[in-house]
Amino acid sequence: MAKFFMLQIPGVTAPWHSVIYFAPILLLGSFVHELGHALAASVEGISVEKVGIVTILFLPATWVQLSPLHMQSLYPWKRLRILCAGVLHNVALSFVALLFYLTLPHVMLPFYSSHEVATVVHIKEGSVLSGEKGLQPGDILLGVNNCTLTPDALKFQACLELPMGQHIISLYIQFSFNREKKLWETFDCTISDDVVIHEGDWLKCCRKEVYHTHLCFEYKPKKEQMVLETVPYACLPIRKVVASSSGFCSDSSDCSEGSFCFHSAENDSLFVLWMNQSHSWNVLFLGSKDGLLSSFTIRWEQIYIPLYSVIPSAIPDVLGKVFYYVCSISCALALLNAFPCFWFDGQHILSTACDIVFSGIHLEKRLRISRAITVGATAFLILSLVSTLIS
């Protein structure tokens, strides 16, 4: 029941800045709705007695009042046409807005180049990715590790899958190392005296005081190289390693001369999330693939880049949001008013439909049938709204 409605209240279930779109579009949708009633009434020779604007939860809406006596004097079919006209006008407005929304990329082609990007829309509460150097809603994700994202529903999961079911990130790292001291001078190497080796061939080689900034990396020799010239592991600063690396590799045979191949030696895998230029750093995640997938949600969105410097870059985004909200809000108004509930058109539509369908039944019985359905539908609507607000 909680998912029957997605209630959008600025400042409560939606950000305050959404009022910029909600207020004028709701006013437009209600105006078109009431205009439909007025036009249909005029066709049947019924005049509009009053018009006005009312505020509902800080949002404006319009209304019209038709003569009840004149409405009751009409044949049920004519009365039903007037009552349904508002809903039909909202459906027509939604269809027109949807048409503009779907054709927007083609209309913008002479002025903008369009690209689909993976946009972060939600970060799980308490996730390590929600920190200062983590992800923010609206960030654009370009790729994961050495995999570039493309508009494919399964592409993000595929980027986390490597051959043989392994989740290893390896990087080209340019080193200057001392074979006698067995340490790398390029980085702050803090190898613990007691290297802890666990079952499954993963280990921890970092001191506890650097756990939050360092990671135990393992050296990957060339496939034909059986004897290592140095220790096979090192505790290195994660962010510095990623920033200094020049690529990805499976072993040192993939590296250029003088470079070495390392990967995470610990039980958790290291994932690098490559962000767009507006993000001043790339986001690192240490954990499992499932943990990464459950930490945030992405959505593919169309972005537009102006072909000429004099054209504002925000126009397509603003128009897209306007058409999207007009379509969704007008459609919601149509569904809500068609619902057989007190205070909405659906109550009168149901009553008139009962007069047509059950014309052979006594008036009092017809009223009981329509009232019983309306009471049940109203109770369902109220419970759904309350459940949505609580959840």
Image (cartoon, rainbow, N blue to C red):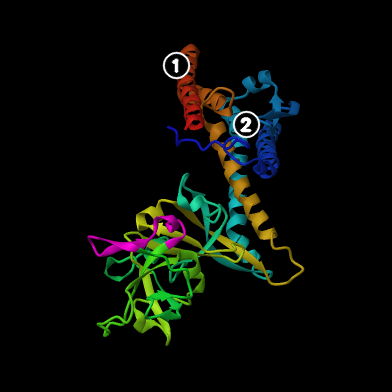
Q: Residue at x 63, y 46 (%)?
A: 326
**Distance in Å between CA atoms under marks 2 and 1:** 24 Å
Outermost residue, bottom side: 257
Q: Amino acid at mark 1?
A: Ile
Mark 2 is surrounded, within 10 Å at the Cα level, by few (under 14), some (14 to 19) or many (20 or more) other residues, namely many
Q: Nearer the viewer, residue 131 or 240?
A: 240
Residue highlighted by disc 1: 361
Q: Nearer the viewer, residue 272 or 34?
A: 272
Q: Position of residue 99 (x, y in %)?
A: 59, 55
Outermost residue, right side: 310
Q: Amino acid at mark 2?
A: Ile
Q: Residue at x 42, y 85 (%)?
A: 256
Q: Nearer the viewer, residue 286 or 309?
A: 286
Residue 195 within the segment the image draws in magenta: yes
Q: On the image, which quarter does residue 156 sit in? A: bottom left
Judged from the image, the secondary structure of the residue bearing numbered disc 1 is: loop
Number of labels in the image equals 2
Q: Nearer the viewer, residue 306 or 107?
A: 306
Region in magenta: 193-214
- Above or below residue 93? Residue 373 is above
Judged from the image, the secondary structure of the residue bearing numbered disc 2 is: helix
